[in-house]
Image (cartoon, grey):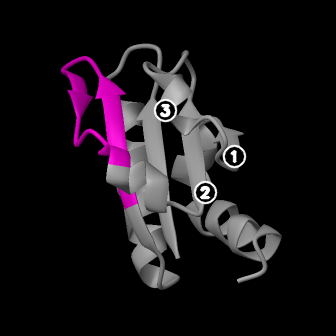
Amino acid sequence: MTIVAVTACPTGIAHTYMAAEQLEKAGRKLGLEIKVETQGAMGIENELSAADVREAAAVVLAVGIPVRRRERFDGKKIYEISPQEAIKNPDAVLMRIKNDLGL
């Protein structure tokens, strides 16, 4: 299963990248394909392509600020969490999504 994610925090520095790293690490551990875009102080990095979004079973928004270009996720199952939850409980977040989607 493919999941896409966006991480962003108010300052766009540490928590943005820590959340991305934790989600990627948990995804690998749980056998999920996950691609994470960061929206931080450096702007948008690792930008999700239209194909990434189209093929995704779910979208995780680990954000503390509004997501730039959120409309590209219209029609997708979206799970919005805080960056802190992605950092502290990434396995639980992704397991919840797997269970919710019946995988």
On screen, residue 52 versus residue 62, left or right, reads left
State the image coordinates of residue 32 (x, y, percent, origin top left): 48, 77
Q: Are marks 1 and 2 in contact (CB under 8 Å)?
A: yes
Q: Determine the image quadrant of residue 97.
A: bottom right
Tell me the mark number nearer the camera, choosing from 2 and 3: 3
Q: What residue sits 52% from the left and 25% below the top?
A: 70
SS state under label 2: strand
On screen, residue 3 versus residue 48, left or right, reads right
Q: Residues within 10 Å of mark 2 (few under 14, many from 20)?
A: many
Q: Which of the pair 65/103 is nearer the observer? A: 103
Q: Determine the image quadrant of residue 28.
A: bottom left
One can see residue 48 in this view:
yes
Q: Which residue is mark 3?
A: 72
For the record, the magenta segment spans 35-50
**Mark 3 or 1 closer to N-term?**
3
Q: Which residue is mark 2?
A: 58
Q: What residue sits 47% from the left and 48% below the top?
A: 5
State the image coordinates of residue 10 (x, y, percent, origin top left): 47, 14
State the image coordinates of residue 86 (x, y, percent, origin top left): 56, 49
One can see residue 83 in this view:
no
